[in-house]
Amino acid sequence: MNVDVLFAGAAVTDFEAARAWYERLFGRAPDIVAHDEEVMWQVTNAGWLYITRDAQHAGESILAMAVPDIEEAKFALEARGVATGAIEQDGDAGRKAVVRDPDGNSIAIIEVVRGDGRRSSQQS
């Protein structure tokens, strides 16, 4: 199977409150407004995160986004009013901090490290 684009979604109950929270998370308005209960942010060249009103499934999403510098990401999120959990070691491969949207959907902010302990974004 070849995949060109990934769309990952989070179901929410209060769409307007969730949209405002995700705008703080990403530091910008959504890239696409599909309709009045679904919006999308392009987070990588071929990766999108969308939220949609769906009270039955709200709070059940588990997402992860890799960043090059987790301390920088945590600082930026907190400056925009998005509370983050503590940065913790996640096995041998990296570190993560978890944020939760107003419905409790889990978004792990992760920093992957190479086998030599350096961040994946550091030069050799």
Image (spheres, rainbow, N blue to C red):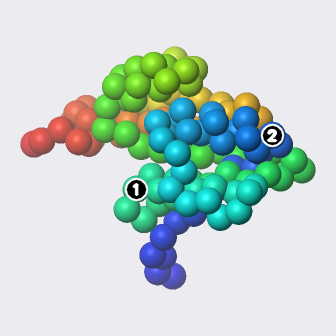
Judged from the image, the secondary structure of the residue bearing numbered disc 2 is loop
On the image, the x and y values in percent for residue 123 come to 12, 41
User: Looking at the image, which is closer to me, 92 or 82?
Assistant: 82
Please tell me which residue is depicted at 26% across the width and 42% down the height of the picture. 120
On the image, the x and y values in percent for residue 23 come to 56, 39
Residue 88 visible to the viewer: no
Q: Is residue 42 left or right of residue 124?
A: right
Q: Is residue 58 left or right of residue 112?
A: right
Q: Is residue 59 above or below residue 48?
A: above
Can you name the residue that lies furthest to the bottom here?
A: 1
Residue kind at label 2, given as amino acid type: Asp
Q: Is residue 12 above or below residue 52?
A: above
The C terminus: image quadrant: top left
Disc 2 target residue: 14
On the image, the x and y values in percent for residue 17 come to 73, 35
Residue kind at label 1, given as amino acid type: Thr
Please tell me which residue is depicted at 83% across the width and 52% down the height of the picture. 54
Disc 1 target residue: 44
Tag 1: Cα neighbours inside 10 Å, few (<14), some, or many (≥20)?
A: few
Please tell me which residue is depicted at 76% across the width and 44% down the height of the picture. 15
Tag 2: Cα neighbours inside 10 Å, few (<14), some, or many (≥20)?
A: some
Please tell me which residue is depicted at 40% across the width and 20% down the height of the picture. 75
Q: CA distance from mark 1 to mark 2?
A: 26 Å
User: Looking at the image, which is closer to me, 97 or 94?
Assistant: 97
Q: Is residue 86 left or right of residue 10?
A: left
Q: How many discs mark residues in the rendered view?
A: 2
Could you tell which of marks 1 and 2 lies nearer the N-terminus?
2
Say which quarter of the image contains residue 113. top left
Judged from the image, the secondary structure of the residue bearing numbered disc 1 is strand
